[in-house]
Image (cartoon, rainbow, N blue to C red):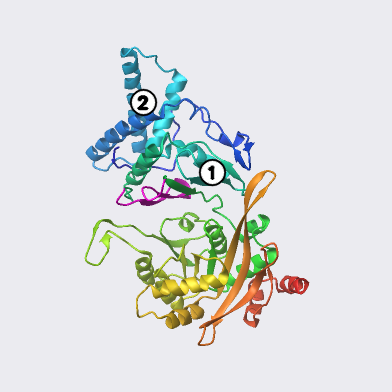
Amino acid sequence: MTSGRFSDDPRTLPLFTQPATDVATAAPRHIGSVSRMPLAPPQAAEGVDWQMVAALRAKASDQLSQAVAADRGRLDKTGQQELGRAIVLELIDTAMVDRVNEGSASMSAADQSRLAHAVFDSLFRLGRLQPLVDDDRIENIIITGHDRVLLELIDGSLLEGPSVADSDDDLIDFLVFLASRSEVNARGFSEAQPRLHLRLDGGSRLAAAAWVTPRPSVVIRRHRLMEVRLEDLVDRQMLTPVAASFLSAAVKARRSIVVSGCQGAGKTTLVRALCAEIDPLEAIGTFETEYELHLHELLDRHRIVHPWEARPGSGERGVDGRQAGEFTLDEALVDSFRFNLSRQIVGEVRGKEIWAMIKAMESGTGSISTTHASDAVAAVRKLVTCAMEAGPHVTQALATSKLAATVDLIVHLDLQTTTGPSGPTRRRRVAEIIALDPGERETGYATTHVFSPDSDRVATPNVLPDAYRALTEHGFDLSGYLLQQGRTS
């Protein structure tokens, strides 16, 4: 297995001569409660010798790495792909000559083209995963072994997918190669480092684990809704128009918001929609372990964005317990104080970085972040615990009082999986919105359910604090809120 490095590029070059098949036209077939769908295009996958693909990819990677090193980094990404394509074709020509010399049957031109596509995808893209990532219907790819693949579509339905490797070892080998090949942010993946988090081309995020799990586990999250607004989420029945008007007004009024929910509940999508309500000329800083929001790529919507991405270290840990080259979110937040930011957007609060964010919110308002929690009130307790990780100087009372003084709203997302006649589906909803205020000494904070979940787990008007009536100046539909509030009562 080679560990040679070279840059990959999100742009798709015209490859070889074989046209790609539109995988979106494949029709699903239902097996039991989960559908099975032949998503991989036959021209690109069926009949391909994947062991030969792996061998050719290793040779091509070695040759390309040597060429890039000899060129001393002057070859750009497009040039590397063009050179890689030439190397792949030459290797296949050599392999065909060897087959004839050995007395084996040669491949047809179509088979050679499919082989070339497969090697190129393995070299620069995602190999056998690429057809799944290219399918615009698929939102999440869930892998619990090379032949156990579950696909979540954008409509929430779950389908079984094709195998993504010939064996678990082959899948791990490809993940190792995938982790090592980026020259910008290469990451290790081995028995010593059994977890992997990668940002992929096109904004997808890959998380993988091996050696510490019975079989390799991989989840690829595709963010299909990049340029999304709150009204788009209303159309998708993720929240009501009244709730959308409240959140829109809260963002414009510079209320600080935390979005909570379980994994896959749609937190990043909602944050992206909330950020769409920010004035285009406000200076925004984004802080993420891997870029997922991609606000810095939405130039028409956000003109001033400073994106920070955490970086894992490598090698042995120093006396301070840190690995060389490590860059954390709390360090990024501290550094951001000199960038004249109007708002800080934290992709996910997991630990002590919330303390740096609280400090930022004390000097500015309107920050947005996410965290994992089972409900909105549990999110408050989670954030208090995270703040206490900053050190013994942050007591529970101090963390609670600071949090209550800086965070205004908690928006909780609910994710439900149901099984119907057409198979299982997942439904995402904004279930509750609570207002957070400083409280009595015993609790440190007070909560008000501005929107509470109804029987269908949809956020409906409940109690509106007087301070939030002023949001009408920013477009809050107060009359609609009071009308629905009366119906609920």
Quadrant (top left, top right, bottom left, bottom right) of the N terminus: top left
Magenta residue check for 153: no
Q: Is residue 335 visible?
A: yes
Name the residue nearer the viewer: 373 or 243. Answer: 373
**Kind of residue at disc 1:** Leu
Q: Residue furthest top?
A: 103
Name the residue nearer the viewer: 14 or 8. Answer: 8
Q: Is residue 1 left or right of residue 196?
A: left
Residue at 29% across / 41% down in the picture? Answer: 3
> Which of the two labelled residues, at mark 2 and mark 1, occupies the earlier sequence position?
2
Which label was assigned to residue 89?
2
Give the quadrant of residue 78: top left
**Kind of residue at disc 2:** Leu
- The percent position of residue 132, horizontal first and vertical second, equals 51, 40
Residue that badge 1 annotates = 150
Element class at badge 2: helix
Residues tagged 2 and 1 counted as in contact (Cβ below 8 A)? no
- The percent position of residue 348, horizontal first and vertical second, equals 46, 63
User: Which segment did they paint magenta?
Assistant: 191-214
Is the residue 73 above or below the residue 403 in the image? above
Residue at 30% across / 60% down in the picture? Answer: 326
Instruction: Give the CA separation, mark 2 to mark 1.
Output: 33 Å
- The percent position of residue 164, horizontal first and vertical second, equals 46, 37
Is the residue 238 above or below the residue 3 in the image? below
